[in-house]
């Protein structure tokens, strides 16, 4: 069960589930998201998942011309009969601080939630799969609560 977790010091409250930080500081956001996508391909191959590039950080001028919207979540998931879900992934900074939702991400997620879309933010693939089951995404098999993390290599932080 996900909870509404305090996400930042602003007045915007997320109206969608936000997983609290998991304390696993050595597992970067991109590897968390990749672990989720790898498992999704096995348990729900009929779900079309794609990443939303954040070009705004790389080239703000180009992003504006392309119509990039601040706050759009990391992954979109689509499955039968027009169903969609939007997933935001968080990890930890090099300094060991947990990622937080920006005001723009909360506003975007809230807007999509009000439009009837499924939205949530995660630190762990296991929590994301639990949420996907709750919202009715059909899966070939039950994803057990397992450790998706890659093992640390000697000397790795």
Image (spheres, rainbow, N blue to C red):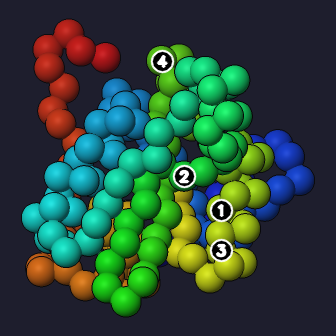
Q: Which residue is mark 4?
A: 94
Could you say whether the residue bearing mark 2 is in a helix, strand or loop? loop
Could you say whether the residue bearing mark 3 is in a helix, strand or loop? helix
The answer to whether mark 1 and mark 3 are in CB contact below 8 A is yes
Could you say whether the residue bearing mark 4 is in a helix, strand or loop? loop
| Residue 67 image position (x, y, % from top left) | 66, 44
With 154 as the anchor, is 134 left or right in this view? right
The answer to whether mark 4 and mark 3 are in CB contact below 8 A is no
Q: Nearer the viewer, mark 4 or mark 2?
A: 2
With 84 as the anchor, is 156 left or right in this view? left
How far apart are the two marked residues, 4 and 1, measured between alpha carbons? 26 Å
Near-viewer residue (137 or 147): 137
Q: Residue furthest top?
A: 155
Disc number for residue 73: 2
Residue at image location 42% in from the left, 83% down from the top: 82
Near-viewer residue (84 or 134): 84
Q: Residues within 10 Å of mark 1 (few under 14, many from 20)?
A: many
The answer to whether mark 4 and mark 2 are in CB contact below 8 A is no
Could you say whether the residue bearing mark 1 is in a helix, strand or loop? helix
How far apart are the two marked residues, 1 and 2, measured between alpha carbons? 8 Å
The answer to whether mark 1 and mark 2 are in CB contact below 8 A is yes
| Residue 110 image position (x, y, % from top left) | 71, 66
- Which corner quadrant holds the C terminus? top left
Disc number for residue 109: 1
Mark earlier in primary sequence (4, 1): 4
Q: Which residue is mark 3?
A: 113
């Amino acid at each position: 069960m996900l909870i509404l977790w305090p996400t930042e010091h602003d007045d915007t409250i997320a109206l969608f589930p936000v997983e609290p930080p998991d304390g696993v500081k050595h597992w970067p956001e991109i590897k968390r998201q990749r672990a989720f996508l790898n498992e999704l391909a096995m348990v729900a191959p009929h779900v079309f998942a794609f990443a939303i590039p954040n070009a705004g950080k790389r080239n703000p001028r180009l992003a504006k011309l392309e119509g990039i919207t601040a706050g759009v979540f990391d992954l979109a998931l689509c499955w039968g009969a027009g169903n969609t879900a939007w997933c935001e992934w968080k990890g930890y900074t090099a300094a060991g601080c947990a990622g937080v939702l920006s005001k723009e991400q909360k506003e975007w997620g809230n807007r999509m939630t009000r439009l009837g879309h499924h939205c949530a933010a995660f630190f762990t693939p296991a929590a994301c799969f639990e949420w996907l089951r709750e919202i009715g995404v059909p899966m070939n098999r039950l994803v057990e609560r397992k450790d998706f993390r890659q093992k640390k290599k000697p000397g790795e932080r």
